[in-house]
Structure formats: structure tokens, C-alpha cells
Image (spheres, helix red, strand yellow):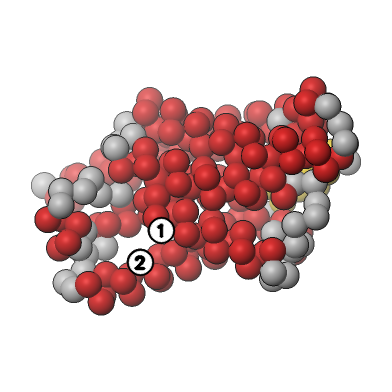
Amino acid sequence: MSAPAARIGRVPVLADLIRTDSRRSALARDVLLTLAGTAFITVAGYIAIPLWFTPVPISLATFAVLLTGAALGPLRGGASAGLYLALGIIGVPLFANGSAGWAFASFGYILGYVAAALLVGILARRRSDRNVWTTLGLATLGSLTIYAFGVPWLAAFLGVDLFAALTLGVVPFLIGDAVKIVAMAALLPATWRVVDRARR
């Protein structure tokens, strides 16, 4: 954690463990971490499986977004997701299957990435990533936030009602989301345990 962060007593997230000695080096660290978060989301988004019965693909991007938010905190995590969104909108092929722009059925989920990264980062700053149960809650809230943006967009884009949008945009992904949530609940607290042991 940088000296300014330590002085104000801010609860650290994992990225804050990369110590810096000056504001300039802290800024460079934050920029590099933000870019790394965007790259992580992009690579994970490319790991996508299209489904024949819905325009929303199975993707690891949601897992990457939640993990990025928790590890980097709300500002850097939100900036990573925001940069991913902005670059994709202007035409850089970062989205699943190398797509870009905004006029497609699953774009609402990408809007939700930014809000989810911010929320998860805020919760991580409150130590919600330190044990299994609170991490389960953190990851669940993050996933619900993505759906809160994705489902209305899907319904409007396809011209279907809410039930149909839930059937197309939520139900097929519940098992996968459960696996991602459990994985986060195992990974983040375990990482903090390793950190605490190293400190001792």
C-alpha cells in the first residue's frame, strides 16, 4: 500500500499490497494495474461459447470483472471495466468473439460490468473478500448487478417481455454463475490467508 493510502487508514485491497514510495510511482502502478485489468477482462471475454437458443454467449468475462473489481478496488477496477467498455464502443474488437460497438443483444451486460466492478471493489474495501461467506455475498451481488443492466437491455433490444428476457439471459447461466461465485469464494480468502501468513 502506498504511503498516502496508509495515512488515511484506507482498507487495502490485494492490489494495494504492491507498495510504492512516491505519488508518481503510485500513479504508474495504478495505470498499469488498470490496463492489466482491462486486458484480463478482454482475454476472459474471448473465452466464450455461443448458445443456439439465446444471443447471449457463455463467457468468462463476468468472472474476470468481479475478480478485477475485488483485487483492484473500486476506482481501478471500475476504470478497467470502463476502459473495456469505451474501447469496445469506439470499435476496438474487445468483446466476446471479437465483436465491438453497442448494437447487439448482450451489450447491456457489458454496461453492467462497470457498475459491478465498482460495487465489488467497494465491498472489498470493506473486507468482504476476506472470508468465504462474505465473498459469496460480494460475488453474488456483483453478478446480480450485471443482470440488472443486461436483462432490460436484452428485453428492449429483442422486443420481448421480462419473462422471455430472463429465460434467455439469466436461466441458462445460473449454473455457470454459481461455479464462478464459488471459485471466487475459494480464491480470494485463500489469497488473503497467504498474504497474512507472509506478513507474520
Q: Is residue 178 left or right of residue 55?
A: left
Q: Residue at x 52, y 43 (%)?
A: 116
Reading the image, the residue beneath label 1 is 76
In the rendered image, the vertical position of residue 119 relative to residue 75, given as above or below? above
Residue 124, image x, y percentages: 35, 41
Inspect this view and state whether residue 71 appears. Answer: no
Q: Residue at x 63, y 49 (%)?
A: 111
Q: Residue at x 44, y 29 (%)?
A: 136
Inspect this view and state whether residue 139 appears. Answer: yes
Q: Does dot 2 land on a helix, a strand or a loop?
A: helix
Reading the image, the residue beneath label 2 is 30
- For the view shown, which residue lies furthest in the top direction? 163
Q: Amino acid at mark 1?
A: Arg
* Quadrant assignment for the N terminus: bottom left
Q: Are marks 2 and 1 in contact (CB under 8 Å)?
A: yes
Residue 46, image x, y percentages: 68, 58
Relative to the observer, which residue lies in front, 144 or 43?
Answer: 144
In the rendered image, the vertical position of residue 29 relative to residue 173, given as above or below? below
Q: Amino acid at mark 2?
A: Asp
